Image (spheres, rainbow, N blue to C red):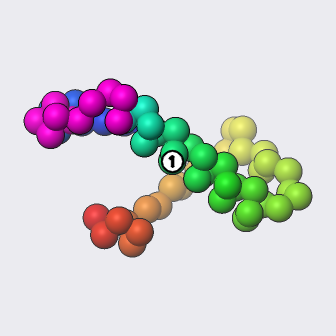
Amino acid sequence: MVLDQKVVKSLGISSSYLEEAKKREIEEIERRMKMYRKNLSEPQIVGKTAIIVDDGIATGS
């Protein structure tokens, strides 16, 4: 997780709030991984190049 500490501080976001949000997001990621992968094993990506794209559709960013 990468945070812009200046923004976090300027908004007054507490570390406890961030930890709870992080926990919820990790749980959601794990839920989606189980749903999408079903019984498939993890892909072997060691030594390979991965391109990660986020179009921002879910958050509107």
Image side of residue 36 versus residue 28, left or right: right
Which residue: 66% across, 49% down?
Answer: 30
Instruction: Check the image and name the residue furthest to the top.
Output: 15
Image side of residue 47 versus residue 37, left or right: left
Q: Residues within 10 Å of mark 1 (few under 14, many from 20)?
A: few
Q: Quadrant of residue 37?
A: bottom right
The answer to which of 48 and 61 lies nearer the viewer is 61
Q: Is residue 5 above or below residue 42?
A: above
Q: Where residue 7 sits: x, y (%)?
A: 17, 38
The answer to which of 20 and 51 lies nearer the viewer is 20
Q: Amino acid at mark 1?
A: Glu
Image side of residue 29 versus residue 22, left or right: right
Chief secondary structure of the magenta portion: helix
Q: Mark 1 — residue?
A: 25
Which residue: 42% across, 42% down?
Answer: 21
Magenta part of the protein: which range? 8-17
Which residue: 39% across, 72% down?
Answer: 57
Q: Where residue 44 sits: x, y (%)?
A: 78, 45
Q: Where residue 27 sits: x, y (%)?
A: 60, 46
Q: Is residue 10 above or below residue 56?
A: above
The answer to which of 52 and 38 lies nearer the viewer is 38
Q: Is residue 5 above or below residue 39?
A: above
Q: Quadrant of residue 40?
A: bottom right
Q: Quadrant of residue 39?
A: bottom right
Image side of residue 7 versus residue 26, left or right: left
Q: Can residue 60 be spotted in the picture? A: yes
Q: Secondary structure at mark 1?
A: helix
The answer to which of 26 and 4 lies nearer the viewer is 26
Q: Where residue 50 sits: x, y (%)?
A: 59, 51
Q: Quadrant of the C terminus?
A: bottom left
